Image (tube, grey):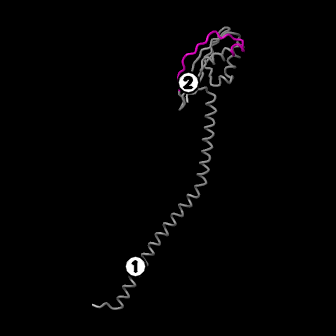
Amino acid sequence: MKISSKVWLIVIIVVIVAALVSLYMVYSRQTAERDELNDRLSEAQTLLPVLTAQKSELENQLASATSLLNTNKAKFPESVESIEYGEYLFEIADECNVDLTSLSFPGPTNKKVGAVTYSVVSLSLPVSGTLDDIFEFIDTIRTDPRFASTQVKSVNLGRGSATISVDIYGYKG
């Protein structure tokens, strides 16, 4: 069987058309994929400045928080040294014209606030003097920078005397 030249021509045309259709389909898929990648690239380029600004803002917040943490750490002593605080209290009592009748330092306890643990020493300060002098003593404890980590818990007044309860906080890093 001999195949005629017309049949060969038709077969060649069909093969060429099939090859062209295949090439067109591959080209169409690649064009669609390229368009999708270009869209994704445009979205990424649009998001980049926003994300860069957010990163910068978060870094600034971190620096600010770190600075605030370091500042607050400096306000809290690493440990509460009873001798130093005892000297300070007697000095303040003398300046305020009150008598600090006794002073004993119990061992520190731990108090956890959030993720931070503090060493806390609770003191009872029995003082005697005039009411004005007692109030001056309390105010001085509240405002003296050496007692920045101290909280006045309660004051029990009597005639010419008072018992002042304070907590001294120390930071436990």
Q: Quadrant of residue 141?
A: top right
Q: Are marks 1 and 2 in contact (CB under 8 Å)?
A: no
Magenta stretch, residue numbers:
91-111
Q: Between marks 1 and 2, how big is the CA–CA gap?
A: 84 Å
**Percent coordinates x, y for residue 64 in the rendering:** 63, 39
**Percent coordinates x, y for residue 135 in the rendering:** 69, 16
Provide the residue designation for mark 1: 18
**Percent coordinates x, y for residue 134 in the rendering:** 69, 14
Question: Label 1's element?
Answer: helix
Write the residue at 36% across / 85% down: 11
In this view, the residue in front, 64 or 135, is 64
**Percent coordinates x, y for residue 55 in the rendering:** 59, 48
> Does residue 17 sit above or below 108 in this rendering?
below
Nearer-N-terminus badge (1/2)? 1
In reply to whether residue 95 is colored magenta, the answer given is yes
User: Which quarter of the rendering shows the N terminus?
Assistant: bottom left
Write the residue at 60% across / 18% down: 82
Write the residue at 58% across / 55% down: 48
Please, what is the three-letter code of the amino acid marked with disc 2? Ser
Q: How many marks?
A: 2
Question: Label 2's element?
Answer: strand
Write the residue at 33% across / 91% down: 4
Please, what is the three-letter code of the amino acid marked with disc 1? Ala
Provide the residue designation for mark 2: 119
Q: Rate crowding at label 2 as few (under 14), some (14 to 19) or many (20 or more) other CA atoms within 10 Å.
A: many
In reply to whether residue 73 is colored magenta, the answer given is no
User: Which quarter of the rendering shows the C terminus?
Assistant: top right
